[in-house]
Amino acid sequence: MKMAIRIDSTAAQAQLRRWGGEFRTQVQQAVRRAITREATEIREDVRRHVGSQMTVVRRFFLKGFTAKVLARDPNRLPALYVGSRIPWAGMHEFGGTITGRLLIPLHGRVGRKRFKAQIAELIRGGNAYFVQGRQGNLVLMAENLREHDRPLAGFKRRYRQAAGIKRLQRGADIPIAVLVPRVVLRKRLDIARRVAGRLPRLAAAIETQIRRID
């Protein structure tokens, strides 16, 4: 997402027409100072917004959203980058559909790597099988066997909580995950609107810094 800021100041525009040499460097430094001061508040506002709209389990997810100054090119004015280091975060900003045969954990959240390792261990032990669910989807099941207590521990706990069962009998079937052809993610974030709402303040800060140039 790119956003442009127009500085509606006669004095500032007059100074910009004198672009070049020392003045050019001074303007770049002024713009950088202004953006740097506003970037922290914009970053924290974005993180608060994400935290209010999504259930965040790990702090690194929020820390992935950042706002920083881009000022390496001496031939261009500094710019403000607002985004996330998490590549799939944009799906929550715009919504979308993920297609393909996807195995989704039931009764709670499980980390991707941990879930993959647990399923692989159950398959190697011959304790993973599919049954057809009530809605026609395939549900991955496992038996409550002693030799598989370790990979099943989290699944059993979440299943008991969801079903209101105090204790599972040995040999009982445990639903682990559901196999679906696609997952539709609705739009949950509106970061673009929040950043756009702060642009007038950012523009004013840039103008103030430019006015201070002798």
Image: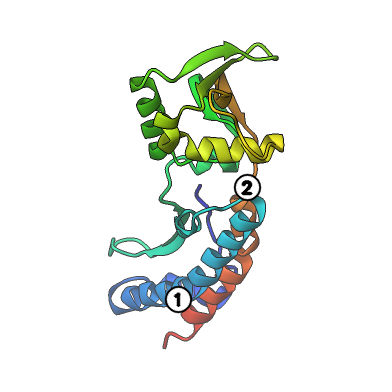
Q: Mark 1 sits on what residue?
A: 15
What amino acid type is highlighted by mark number 1? Gln
Name the residue at 66% across, 51% down.
53
The percent position of residue 31, horizontal first and vertical second, equals 43, 72
Nearer to the camera, 139 or 147: 147
Distance of mark 2 from mark 1, alpha carbons? 39 Å
Residue 108 appears in the rendering: no
Name the residue at 53% across, 35% down.
155
Residue 85 appears in the rendering: yes
Label 1: which secondary element: helix
Near mark 2 (Cα within 10 A), the count class, few <14, some 14-19 or many ≥20, is many
The percent position of residue 32, horizontal first and vertical second, equals 40, 72
Which of the 4 image quadrants contains residue 187? top right
The percent position of residue 189, horizontal first and vertical second, equals 62, 47
Residue 31 relative to residue 97: left or right: left
Mark positioned earlier in the residue sequence (2 or 1) = 1
Disc assigned to residue 189: 2
From this view, report whether residue 103 is shown above or below residue 86.
Answer: above
Count of labels shown?
A: 2
* Structure colour scheme: rainbow
What amino acid type is highlighted by mark number 2? Leu
From this view, report whether residue 167 is shown above or below residue 178.
Answer: below
From this view, report whether residue 25 is shown above or below residue 195.
Answer: below
Nearer to the camera, 21 or 140: 140
Disc assigned to residue 182: none
Label 2: which secondary element: loop
Quadrant location of the C terminus in the rendered image: bottom left
From this view, report whether residue 172 is shown above or below residue 2.
Answer: above
Name the residue at 51% across, 47% down.
1
Name the residue at 50% across, 44% down.
89
Q: Which label sits in the foreground, 2 or 1?
A: 2
